[in-house]
Image: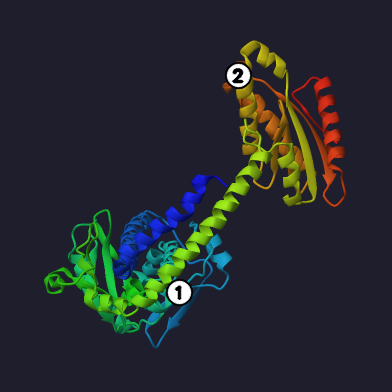
Amino acid sequence: MPKSNLKHIFIIPTLFLVLLLSIVLDNHIGSVQRQVNREYDRIIDSLQRTIKVMISLDYNLSQLYKQSSGGFYNHNFELDEQAGLCVIRPSNDQSAVMANQDVSVPNSRLDYSFAGVKELCDPSSELYDIASKKVTLAPVISFIHDNEKYLHGIYFISKYDYIISSPKQIAENLTQQTLDTIYSRPYWKNSIKNKNQKHITFTPPYTDAFFDGLEVITFSTPIYYKELFKGVLVIDLSVDKLLRSNNDVSKHIQLLESDQYEQFEQYRFMQPVTLTDTNFTYFLYYKSSIKEELISFLTHDIKSLTLIFVTYILAVLSMFYYQTHLSQRYYRDLAKQDPMTGLYNRRGFEMSLQDRVVKKFVGFALYDIDDFKQINDVFGHDVGDDAIIYVAKILNKSVRDSDIVSRFGGEEFVICINADSRASLESVCERVRKSIQDSSGKVVKGGFTVSGGVAVIDSQQDFSFEHVIKKADDLLYKAKQDGKNRVYFS
């Protein structure tokens, strides 16, 4: 083993030991800081995605008003006399529902419902006609809701006394009285007052006793078409699901109004949150006492120092093993590698065959640059070397990682290709030849071609390496005799 490697065995772990000792007192706090920042990034990203969803749905809704027709294809209608409302749900045959809607979303459950006054169930009513033109929006909001865990609900409240919601429970739990109540809620009133059609109204955290008693925050925006108010798009976020994750530090994160900032400024880990086009003025806050964290960490100081010392010993032993292994592998790989191209040489090729991925067919392809002596004679050996290197790159790029590419010497290359079918194997070999033919002009003026011979065998049969290479060589010779720039297969 080289002496420089022996130095590294001790120098690197010792530097690591010194570094670890210098940061041991701050390590715990630093870890918490990083976790808190990750949680903040997650929360802010969720809020920003919500705004983007609002903008996208706003646009989609506005476009739906341009439609001249629509229909509740493959939907079930229920007139709930007790609630005094009409409820429309997608049928259980999701494929049938999607086949009749001009919308494309990934496969997911269709968790949405329409609910509105009784006229909604009457196909001859104006309300039915208005609502049916919005049915293509429903699968979209269902998909978005299902794929964002922090979303409590997405719903469009039309000024025409109906609502589209995901999840479906929001619409299906309505009654005539609660539907009327919606139009007096803050997000409806504030959105109507919002004359800036691009502005999104934020409603601070509140307990949603109206549906299931969860604490939620709400983003809402008025929907306009040709300057006419059509309704309000609402997204509810569950405060608990937004702030909490599997990380323990998230249990201590709070969302507080900006005017409360000063009373918490004695603590660390505070970050204001700015959301474009909204009235959102809150900050994220994590209550952490450095003194308590430090005392808790120092309680285990002896164990920490012991762990550091053991880690140092293990690091020295690991470095010794690693450097030994690295040196052995380096010299071993060097003996298997062609220095010019970086490909396997013949020895490396034969050794790699033992670990090859086996499929139904195995092909041993032997390629040779056509008229290589003429390239050297006309352009010089430097260009000849460039041609060899270029072919090596093309071969490497044209096959999979599980295939083996090698240079046996001179301008001769061998590839071991595994394939599920003979046609697939032949396609790869032809693609290699054509790729070199089409692009070799980048290296040699006028370009050059290669010829190939491929011995194809069934992977289940025993074979002699020397035999298949000889067969491929014979096919290569025939390809050269028959005009070059072609690949023959056994």
The type of residue carrying mark 1 is Ile
Q: How many marks?
A: 2
User: Crowdedness of circle 2 by 10 Å Cα count: few (<14), some, many (20+)?
Assistant: some
Residue at position x 34%, y 82% in the image: 211
- Residue at 35% x, 70% y is 155
User: In percent of the image, x 38 and y 80: which residue is there?
Assistant: 85
Query: Which residue is nearer to you in this view: 277 or 337?
Result: 337
| SS at mark 2 in the image | helix
Relative placement, left or right, of 150 versus 413 is left
Asked if marks 1 and 2 touch (Cβ < 8 Å), the reply is no
SS label for mark 1: strand
Residue at the outermost top position: 378
Please determine whether, in this image, residue 300 is positioned above or below residue 468.
below
Label 2, on which residue?
Answer: 383
Question: Looking at the picture, does residue 196 appear above or below residue 490?
Answer: below
Asked whether the viewer can see residue 245, the reply is no
Q: Is residue 44 left or right of residue 109?
A: left
Q: What numbered label is drawn on residue 227?
A: none
Percent x, y of residue 152: 36, 74
Q: Is residue 185 above or below residue 23?
A: below
Residue type pointed to by label 2:
Val
Give the alpha-carbon distance from disc 1 to disc 2, as whole Å: 74 Å
Which quadrant of the view contains residue 409? top right
Q: Position of residue 276 (x, y in %)?
A: 24, 57
The reply to whether residue 430 is visible in this rendering is yes
Where does residue 437 sit, x and y in percent of width and height? 66, 25
| Residue labelled with disc 1 | 88
Instruction: Tell me the mark number nearer the camera, choosing from 1 and 2.
Output: 2
The quadrant of the rendering that contains the C terminus is: top right
